[in-house]
Image (cartoon, rainbow, N blue to C red):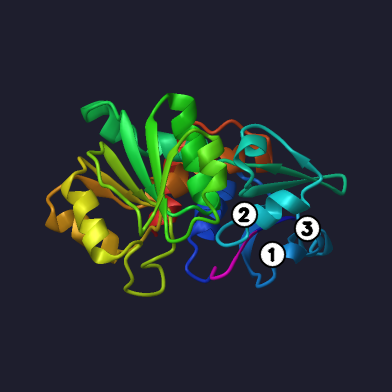
């Protein structure tokens, strides 16, 4: 049996195992996918190899450490500087980022209503980097706001507008994205409430990368009566791309629906 896992901290909330295991069952692939809590991201490559894994996904806060520790980076991940997927090729760790294309697929329903030309990302971690690169590739005018200045250099080099909480000036946005973990294990907002309310008041839609719960961020979006969604579709579509890498299998519509059903169970 082929073994896969997801690394993260926290990771107990992850629905990736039920999604991927449903996919394995659908195509009759002899594989199993579980969860691996990991505190020290710098050990991720060694733990991955020691567990004799064929592949793995990586969630917060280890995506940048996973990038640094990989033997080879492929695709957009080299531009993002963060990865969420590992593949073991004869003891060599090959890394990918499926967050960027998965996210763009997830916001298609917003794009179909009105093209997204201007967006703001809350947070500056690995997920934010993936989304910013995806927006850059799509020609979307992007602003990134973060608590501190220290993590904004990447986004400046990408020609995004950047701001800290202290110097932020709100504009009008087609989409606001919460890329932070605020609301995952607490009742926190991704920015101070006055800033968040100002952003939502001037935004046409909202998406939270957290899935499976109505976060304080999404509650506020609901209060402002703008269309919103959680991160379930992003999880699904990034997972589908990772699944193709794990199994060397093309994801048919029926496979995607099987994985979606597994995700919702």
The Cα atoms of the two marked residues, 3 and 1, are separated by 9 Å
Q: Does the rendering let one see residue 239?
A: no
Assess whether residue 25 is covered by the magenta stretch.
no
Q: In the figure, 128 relative to 107: above or below? A: below
Determine the residue positioned at 78% across, 65% down: 47
Mark 3 or 1, closer to the camera: 1
Q: Residues within 10 Å of mark 3 (few under 14, many from 20)?
A: some
87 vs 166, nearest the viewer: 166
As rendered, which of 243 and 133 lies closer to the eye? 133
User: Does residue 187 sit above or below 1 in this rendering?
Assistant: below
State yes or no: discs 2 and 1 in contact (Cβ < 8 Å).
no
Q: Which of the image's four quarters has the N terminus? A: bottom right
**Residue of label 2:** 63
Q: Which mark is residue 41?
A: 1
Report the residue marked by disc 3.
Answer: 45
Q: Which residues are magenta?
A: 6-11
For marks 2 and 3, give the one nearer the viewer: 2
């Amino acid at each position: 049996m082929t073994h896969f896992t997801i690394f993260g901290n926290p990771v107990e909330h992850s629905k990736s195992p039920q999604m991927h295991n449903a996919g394995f069952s659908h195509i009759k692939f002899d594989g199993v996918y579980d969860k691996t809590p990991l505190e020290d991201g710098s050990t991720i490559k060694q733990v991955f190899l020691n567990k004799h894994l064929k592949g793995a996904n990586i969630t917060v806060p280890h995506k940048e450490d996973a990038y640094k520790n990989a033997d080879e980076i492929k695709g957009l991940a080299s531009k993002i500087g963060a990865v969420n997927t590992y593949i073991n090729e004869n003891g060599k760790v090959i890394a990918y980022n499926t967050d960027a294309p998965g996210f763009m697929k997830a916001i298609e329903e917003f794009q179909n209503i009105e093209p997204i030309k201007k967006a703001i990302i809350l947070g500056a971690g690995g997920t934010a980097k993936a989304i910013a690169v995806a927006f850059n590739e799509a020609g979307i005018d992007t602003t990134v706001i973060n608590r501190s200045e220290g993590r904004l250099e990447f986004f400046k080099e990408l020609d995004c507008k950047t701001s800290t909480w202290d110097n932020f000036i709100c504009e009008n946005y087609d989409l606001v994205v919460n890329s932070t973990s605020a609301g995952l294990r607490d009742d926190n907002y991704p920015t101070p409430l006055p800033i968040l309310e100002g952003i939502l008041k001037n935004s046409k839609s909202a998406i939270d990368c957290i899935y499976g719960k109505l976060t304080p961020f999404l509650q506020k979006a609901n209060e402002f009566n703008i269309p919103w969604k959680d991160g379930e579709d992003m999880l699904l579509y990034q997972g589908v791309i990772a699944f193709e890498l794990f199994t060397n299998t093309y994801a048919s519509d029926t496979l995607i629906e099987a994985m979606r059903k597994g995700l919702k169970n």
